[in-house]
Image (tube, grey):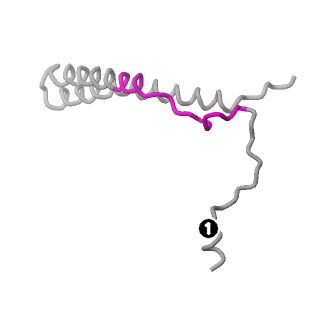
Amino acid sequence: MKRPSLDPKAMTEGAAAYSKVVTIASEMVVPGLIGLWIDHQFGTGPVAAVSGFVLGMILCVWHLMKMALTPPRQSRRQGQSEDHVDTSPHTDSPEADQNRNR
């Protein structure tokens, strides 16, 4: 049985989405875990843990807003279809030709 081919564009988009999810989850959890460790080491009660989780939520919301307001990057030049492959030879500018002839 033949395996279906994987679309590189879909794989790239999936990896980017996975990265965003892991980043957001880490921003929410890690400050709270650091706070728990501080509370355990210094016996400060839940003060540092609660502060860490609140800080994590603030970081999470800030990062989500930043991602939502950032326009997606264009992967191709405008006006070029996805089927277009540039096979034309690339020529240098006249200035580059003059510098090469020196």
Residue 3 to residue 77: above or below: above
> Relative to residue 84, is residue 36 drawn left or right?
left
Residue at image position (38%, 22%) is 64
Residue, disc 1: 96
Quarter of the picture holding the C terminus? bottom right
- Describe the element under mark 1 as helix, strand or loop: helix
Question: Which quadrant of the structure image shows residue 13?
Answer: top right
- Find residue 5 and report its horizontal and vertical position in percent: 77, 28
Q: Which residues are magenta?
A: 63-82
Quarter of the picture holding the N terminus? top right
**Looking at the image, which is closer to me, 77 or 65?**
77
- Find residue 78 and report its horizontal and vertical position in percent: 61, 35
> Relative to residue 25, is residue 99 drawn left or right?
right
Q: Residue furthest right?
A: 1
Q: Is residue 11 magenta?
A: no
Q: Amino acid at mark 1?
A: Ala
Residue 8 to residue 95: above or below: above
- Find residue 65 and report its horizontal and vertical position in percent: 36, 22
Residue at image position (13%, 26%) is 43
Q: Is residue 77 magenta?
A: yes
Residue at image position (62%, 36%) is 76
Q: Residue furthest bottom?
A: 102
**Looking at the image, which is closer to me, 41 or 24?**
24
**Looking at the image, which is closer to me, 39 or 54?**
54
- Find residue 51 and report its horizontal and vertical position in percent: 19, 23
Residue 77 to residue 50: above or below: below
